[in-house]
Image (cartoon, grey):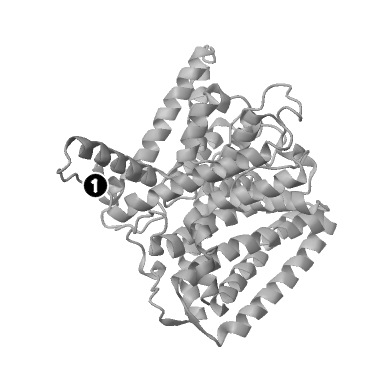
């Protein structure tokens, strides 16, 4: 357990150190009380975490698959609890609401119980958005450093940077050396954030607004820091840039190791990324058609804003973000279609959630093979679809993930149906929380709906919020990894 404790202390130390950003924001807005409370919390938490790391530096650590999975799940659970502290201490938020906000932020779900957000302290709003940014990095770290090296749940083993490779043969490894695998990925993530930040600045957004949009778009999150729609605060160029960042974040173009001598060849071979962009393009066209049907384009001046809104909604759905430029845009298409696209999600090595296009391809390959074997029982059928190759392991392991996804949807749907709202509301809420696209549920709330018919997230009861936290975490983590640590046979043999 020393390795697990060490990695947990390292993640907690970075977590508390990152509170310096909301502290500076609060200082700039003269939020004296919030700054004081956050400063005490950050300094105390960082001191305890760093002290724990130093205490275990002299020990020898063994990196094994079980410890990697255990560390990943414990880090997500621990940071979800630690993320509640700023809300509880600085904003006097009830614990179960603070936990819902923290889990929603780290899982980049975007579901929120906050009201009158523009009247809240800017430091707290910044922290809520920063949780999504941290959750995006945790997602990438989990994929590159745990799930893909261990080939869990049908994930492909892609060629990665040498510093991201992990040897899991039980060889002893000093704790400080193990951290070298995390820091390069964090550096690349910060560099991408800086680029996105300056792009938003160039589009005419102020610095604080650019930071907000950078954190939520790069992580494919869905939290809106405003009481009104994004379109009321940002112009068409800013929304176009945000949609572009969401699209790139939904692919695996940036997050993989590429041969920079010929990047176009590598990008061309990345079929999954092309399918993501194709899906965004198709969704954009469908929204354009929906706008034309309602007569939204009456002149030449309406064409560009409508095109940007269509592109924005399409990228938001495919990236499992749920953002919409203004209310009513996403709901132009039927919810059964929109939620089906969000359920599939985007590329494997991205900050998006959902089943992922790679697994969908593996399942289609298996389906086509079985159908062909019914006609030609002795035939040899290649494991290939749309010029993408799949190995037997990816095909076999993709189906359990699909089954577990549907099982969790059924569990969440029937448990949420015991509270407020009708069955349709419970079903859409369960789907939105599972695919970490919380705002999609808000997008389909009927006009003038009452809380007992179709409640918003702030109308959920305590039990419903706790169930929502579990569903959001399961949606973000790989189900096979979560159920692996629940294996009683493994723990009884320790």
Specify the quadrant of the image occupied by residue 57. bottom right
Residue at (40% x, 64% y) in the render: 150
Q: Return the residue found at the far bottom.
A: 58
Q: Is residue 73 found left or right of 125 in the rendered image?
A: left
Assign the N terminus to one quadrant of the image: bottom right
| In the foreground, 164 or 59 | 59
Residue at (48% x, 70% y) in the render: 66
Residue at (39% x, 64% y) in the render: 149
Residue 5, percent across and down?
60, 75
Q: Is residue 420 found left or right of 491 in the rendered image?
A: right
| In the foreground, 361 or 9 | 361
Q: Is residue 449 found left or right of 207 in the rendered image?
A: right
Residue 53, percent across and down?
61, 79
| In the foreground, 458 or 483 | 483
Residue 133, percent across and down?
58, 53
| In the foreground, 70 or 318 | 70
Residue highlighted by disc 1: 383
């Amino acid at each position: 357990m020393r390795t697990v404790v060490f990695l947990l202390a390292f993640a907690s130390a970075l977590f508390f150190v990152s509170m310096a950003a909301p502290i500076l924001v609060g200082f700039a807005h003269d939020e004296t009380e919030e700054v004081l409370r956050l400063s005490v919390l950050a300094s105390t938490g960082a001191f305890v975490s760093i002290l724990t790391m130093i205490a275990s530096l002299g020990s020898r650590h063994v990196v094994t698959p079980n410890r990697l999975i255990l560390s990943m799940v414990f880090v997500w659970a621990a940071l979800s609890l630690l993320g509640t502290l700023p809300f509880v201490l600085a904003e006097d938020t009830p614990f179960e609401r603070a936990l819902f906000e923290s889990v929603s932020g780290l899982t980049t779900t975007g579901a929120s119980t906050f009201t009158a957000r523009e009247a809240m302290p800017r430091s707290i709003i910044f922290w809520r958005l920063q949780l999504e940014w941290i959750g995006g990095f945790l997602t990438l770290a989990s994929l590159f450093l745990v799930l893909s090296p261990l080939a869990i749940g049908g994930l492909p083993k892609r060629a990665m940077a040498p510093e991201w490779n992990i040897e899991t043969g039980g060889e002893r490894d000093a704790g400080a050396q193990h951290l070298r695998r995390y820091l390069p990925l964090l550096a690349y993530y910060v560099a991408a954030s800086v680029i996105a930040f300056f792009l938003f600045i160039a589009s005419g957004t102020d610095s604080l607004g650019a930071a907000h949009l950078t954190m939520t778009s790069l992580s494919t999150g869905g939290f809106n820091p405003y009481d009104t729609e994004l379109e009321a605060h940002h112009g068409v160029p800013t929304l176009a840039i945000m949609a572009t960042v969401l699209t790139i974040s939904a692919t695996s173009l940036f997050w993989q190791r590429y041969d920079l001598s010929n990047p176009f060849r590598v990008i061309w071979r990345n079929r999954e990324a092309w399918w993501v962009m194709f899906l965004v393009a198709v969704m954009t066209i469908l929204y354009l058609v929906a706008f034309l049907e309602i007569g939204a384009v009456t002149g030449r001046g309406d064409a560009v804003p409508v095109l940007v809104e269509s592109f924005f909604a399409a990228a938001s759905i495919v990236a499992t973000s749920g953002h919409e430029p203004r209310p009513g845009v996403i709901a132009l298409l039927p919810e059964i279609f929109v939620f089906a696209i969000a359920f599939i999600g985007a590329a494997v090595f991205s900050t998006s959630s959902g089943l992922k296009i790679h697994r969908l391809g593996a399942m289609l390959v298996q389906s086509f093979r079985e159908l062909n074997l019914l006609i030609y029982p002795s035939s040899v059928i290649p494991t290939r679809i749309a010029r993408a190759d799949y190995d037997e392991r990816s095909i076999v392991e993709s189906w359990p993930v699909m089954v577990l996804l549907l099982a969790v949807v059924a569990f969440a749907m029937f448990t949420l149906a015991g509270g407020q709202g009708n069955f349709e509301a419970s079903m859409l809420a369960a789907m939105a929380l599972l695919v970490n696209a919380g705002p999609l549920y808000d997008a389909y709330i009927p006009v003038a709906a009452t809380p007992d018919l179709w409640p918003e997230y702030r109308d959920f009861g305590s039990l419903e919020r706790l169930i929502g936290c579990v569903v959001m975490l399961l949606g973000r983590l790989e189900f096979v990894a979560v159920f692996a640590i629940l294996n009683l046979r493994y723990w009884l043999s320790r």
